[in-house]
Amino acid sequence: MEEQSNLSPEQSPKEQSPKCPDNCAPHSFIGLPIDNLIGGPLRAAAEAQQKMVNSINEFLKNGGQQELVNSTKEFLEKIASEEKKG
């Protein structure tokens, strides 16, 4: 739900928050390209995740699935033997 304001839309962001001094956080962001500052890292993260998914798919297509099963089995057996030792 959108918050309603008693201030007119013609007022600048500085005028819309009269209780905030000039050096407070909201005023620090006036004029910054927020879309670029946030969008760039988000796009980079999404691209990195897509590359990771592609790598995993390629690994599994090339027989990596059995390798993964074997290494997981070895790891679990190692943990089980260490737990028995105490």
Image (tube, rainbow, N blue to C red):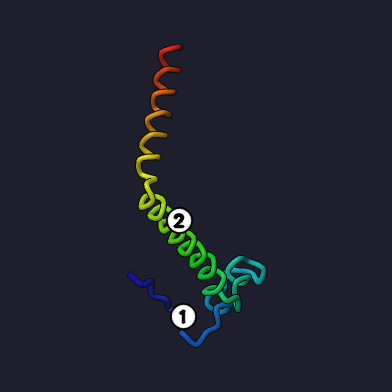
Amino acid at the residue labelled 2: Met
**Of the image marks 2 and 1, the number of the one nearer the N terminus:** 1
Decide: is 52 above or below 33: above
> What is the number of the mark on residue 52?
2
Q: Residue at x 54, y 73 (%)?
A: 34
- Label 1: state its secondary structure: loop
Residue found at the far top of this picture: 85
The residue at which mark 1 appears reads as: 7
Residue shown at 55%/82% (left/top)?
A: 12
> As drawn, is 21 to the left or to the right of 5?
right
Please tell me whether residue 41 is drawn above or below residue 86 in the rendered image. below
Few, some or many C-alpha atoms within 10 Å of disc 2 (few <14, some 14-19, many ≥20)? Answer: few
Q: Residue at x 52, y 65 (%)?
A: 44
Q: Position of residue 84 (x, y in %)?
A: 41, 13
Amino acid type, callout 1: Leu
Q: Foreground: 47 or 3?
A: 47
* Residue reaching furthest to the left: 1
The quadrant in which the N terminus is found is bottom left
| Front residue of this view, candidates 81 and 7 | 81
Circle 2 SS class:
helix
Establish if 15 lies above or below 48.
Answer: below
Number of marks present in the image shown: 2
